[in-house]
Image (cartoon, rainbow, N blue to C red):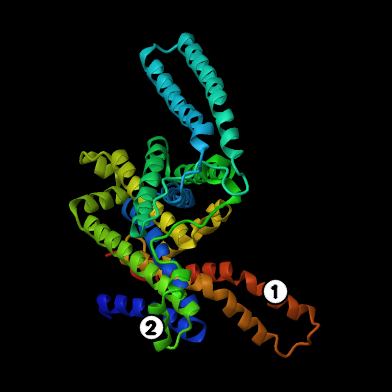
Amino acid sequence: MNPAVKNTLLFAIVGAMILYSGFTQSWNTALLILNMGLISAIMALGVNLQWGFAGLFNVGIMGFVALGGLAAVLVGMPATPGAFAAGGWNIAGALLFGVATIVAVVLTRRAMAQGWARGTVTLALLIAGFFFYRALFDPGVEAVEAINPAGTGYLGGLGIDRGLWVALAWPVGGLFAAGAAWVIGRTALGLRSDYLAIATLGIAEIIIAVLKNEDWLARGVKNVVGLPRPTPYEIDLQNDPGFVENAALYGFDPVTASTLFVKLAYAGLFTVVLVILLILAQRALNSPWGRMMRAIRDNEVAAEAMGKDVTARHLQIFVLGSAVCGIAGAMMTTLDSQLTPGTYQPLRFTFLVWVMVIVGGSGNNFGSVLGGFLIWFLWVQVEPMGLWLMELITAGMAEGSALRAHLIESAAHMRLFTMGLVLLLVLRFSPRGLIPER
């Protein structure tokens, strides 16, 4: 079969599956799958840049996604009244002093010759800097978190709540993730691939731990709810006589129509972002830069012999891929309209994104997008399908049967079983993915 026809057919099958869930379940469910599928496709695209282009094994994806979610809070939510006056400047000063201490240590170590004197001065600078940092930081944090802790208790953000301007948080999320990736890459990209994976996983856990525990930043596990969004609010649509009249013409009640309209608006925005990123990724893949990255991936020694700076190029693509994941994280938080750090589970959802890339086709941007839609659809639908299957299998068993109860309860575990099964089948019958790299 012609590859173009085959690829089109695969996307059509996934689209038909989403439409089928709309006809048989509800259009709310279908649009939710579509929106999260778009976000998942963007995440898979970011990981494919790192792994498919350069062979970088990053398992810290959720850390960069969480930074994107933090950007949505810091851009969209209003500043907490009185927070900066109470302790915000203390926190800002402490953070700047911490950075200055690190810079001073680095410059001192460069200026002094190796020996006991350099070690002593370094230790003295670090100890003095730590105590001064805590003397500024701790009172500021206590003052900020004491301001209406049930409702705020954090610094807040820029308060950008003006229609589509809310989407400014998405590129900011990409910048946050890119900045973190640059710091990580400068220290970890010289490591072997397995050590890089361990390092990125550990740093992702650190990022999420900071979000959970530093209440002054984004309320920690108390969560930030009611984030502004770039789409209309359902209640405003329901109070609009023109919208209610149009909904009635199509046979919808105002509540259902407003919900569907908002989700369709999100789908339109997410599609625009995905198309832009896909076009840029394709142009990069087919450019001399993309060919160089694949050459480095396939044989680093040969690329270095040709004069290529492998570490610098790895850092470049690591930052780009992480930025794409940060954009997806900001979009997901905006869609949910809340930041819940407890839901960022690095191992579980990192595994899911990697399955998307491998099943779709590592090294192929369209394959990653297809994998994002397909795997997310299965992730949502497998559990109800598994419950239906177990009820069908146990239909002839007695109501009080322990085996029947066990099998029905086991339907909740069908998700991970199905992900593993799909991964095994693809690796056996199409090891390069459904849409392999050319």
Q: Which residue, as the protein is rendered here, is positioned at the far top?
A: 117
User: Given the image, on which type of amino acid does mark 1 rest?
Assistant: Glu
Q: CA distance from mark 2 to mark 1?
A: 44 Å
- Location of residue 147 in the rendering, given as x and y in whole percent from the top left corner: 59, 40
- Location of residue 344 in the rendering, given as x and y in whole percent from the top left corner: 54, 54
Tell me which residue sits at (49%, 68%) in the image: 424
Label 1: which residue? 409
Label 2: which residue? 246
- Kindly indicate whether the residue at mark 1 contacts the one at mark 2 (C-beta within 8 angstroms): no
Quadrant of residue 53 within the rendered picture: bottom left
User: Given the image, on which type of amino acid does mark 2 rest?
Assistant: Asn
Q: Which residue occupies the foreground of this view, 433 or 371?
A: 371
Tell me which residue sits at (67%, 73%) in the image: 410
- Residue 55 visible to the viewer: no
Is 344 positioned to the left or the right of 314 in the image?
Answer: right
Number of numbered discs visible in the structure rendering: 2
Near mark 2 (Cα within 10 A), the count class, few <14, some 14-19 or many ≥20, is some
